[in-house]
Amino acid sequence: MLRKEQNDLLTQTGPGTPMGDMFRCYWIPALLAEELPDNDCAPVRVKLLSERLLAFRDSEGRYGLIDEFCAHRGVSLWFGRNEQGGLRCPYHGWKYDHTGQCTEVPSEPKESGYCGKIKLKSYPLIKIGDILWTYMGPAEKQPPHPEWEFALVPSEQTFTSKRWQECNWLQAMEGGIDSSHVSWLHSGNLNSDPLFKGARGNKYNMSDARPFFEVTDNEGGLFIGARRNAEEGHYYWRITPWVMPSFTMVPPRGDHPVHGHFWIPIDDENCWAWSFDYHPVRALTTEERQAMIAGKGIHVAYVPGTYRPLANKDNDYLMDRDAQRKGITYSGVEGIAMQDASLQESMGPIVDRSKENLVSTDNGIIMARHRLLKAARALRDKGVVPPGVDPAHHRVRSAAIVLPVDKSYVDVAEEALTVISGKAPTSV
């Protein structure tokens, strides 16, 4: 369990907080590229790390992420006109470029130079893969661009979605590194969901609900190995990489695409759950991509016109008690993503970790918390750059492998857990 002050440190990410400062060391996903599809398209409200921002794409295709509010009277620039290289406030015509610099104040003489003194807070916004990424820390400490494999493969090999999750980022992320719940919560989906079914590893998940965990440090975070019984004399290992602060990659199943997540704070009581599927050596099939668009696997169907899941707490996640009784879905909630989200949101906006009773299968969560606390304090007290900022830490893979009982994944899986261009993932 955690003391209240430890829980507060880990869950609070607004400006000036230790964890907020740590998140601001990284490039983080801000929007899907599809949200700003064209030059001079409508701007988009963005809230990240408790800051209210506005994203837009100007007449030359440059992306901007600036303070949402006009420096004049505080009007939301979401109402602004995106035109001729900038965003114009409709209230009094003040205009801003993609860096937040004010370029026109119609009521003041141009020769006064007044507008040159006005600049909104802004952050860089870059496109890598189908995501627009931002860095919200000090400009002089901006790190190199991220190098996650899923964002660098050709577009036909990858698919990314996001969904609003109504709880703190940490309890969502902790679900992403907890492999023990798969044998229970997701048992109805392993052999029915088109993005999971048919893999040999599914039978090991179903037949052994008491995994043994072996967790090891790596430079960027942790490798979390979950071991289950396989054929006589062998174990089935599923190894999940966690890269600080909030990247996880789910171990693969057969030749299905590999998937994973980022958990990015909106504020202290909401987060964006980013979900990606990709295959390192082949294009996604039409059937796979259509299943992802339809909300299968780790993706969701949306409330039309939003990124809020169609199944959400306001409709009890469309829970089906009959399907639960029949074992079609173990919890009565359909879909991997919402099975996770429904239970994580049920804890409340920020779970009180001082009341927990943790067990051996929670070792990955325990060690992740310790590493986050250590890194946040080292940044706060000594200015030490946290793990996961270096792009070298991004070049990791998950793996699923069957090994003899006298072998640990630590001994034999180093190559399987490293990105090697042109090499398929290690999967069962």
Image (tube, rainbow, N blue to C red):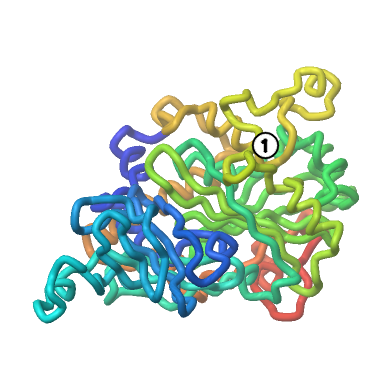
Quarter of the image with the N terminus is top left
Q: Quadrant of residue 188?
A: top right
- Number of callouts: 1
Q: Residue at x 52, y 32 (%)?
A: 358
Q: Quadrant of residue 11?
A: top left
Write down the residue under mark 1. 181
Q: Residue at x 33, y 34 (%)?
A: 3
Q: Residue at x 66, y 44 (%)?
A: 179
Can residue 189 be seen here? yes
Which amino acid lies under the numbered mark 1 shown in the image of this protein? Answer: His
Q: Is residue 54 left or right of residue 273?
A: left
Q: Quadrant of residue 313?
A: top right
Can residue 177 be seen here? no
Q: Residue at x 70, y 80 (%)?
A: 421
The spot of residue 136 in percent (x, y) is 34, 63
Q: Nearer the viewer, residue 26 or 90?
A: 90
The spot of residue 47 in percent (x, y) is 40, 50
- For mark 1, give the secondary structure: helix
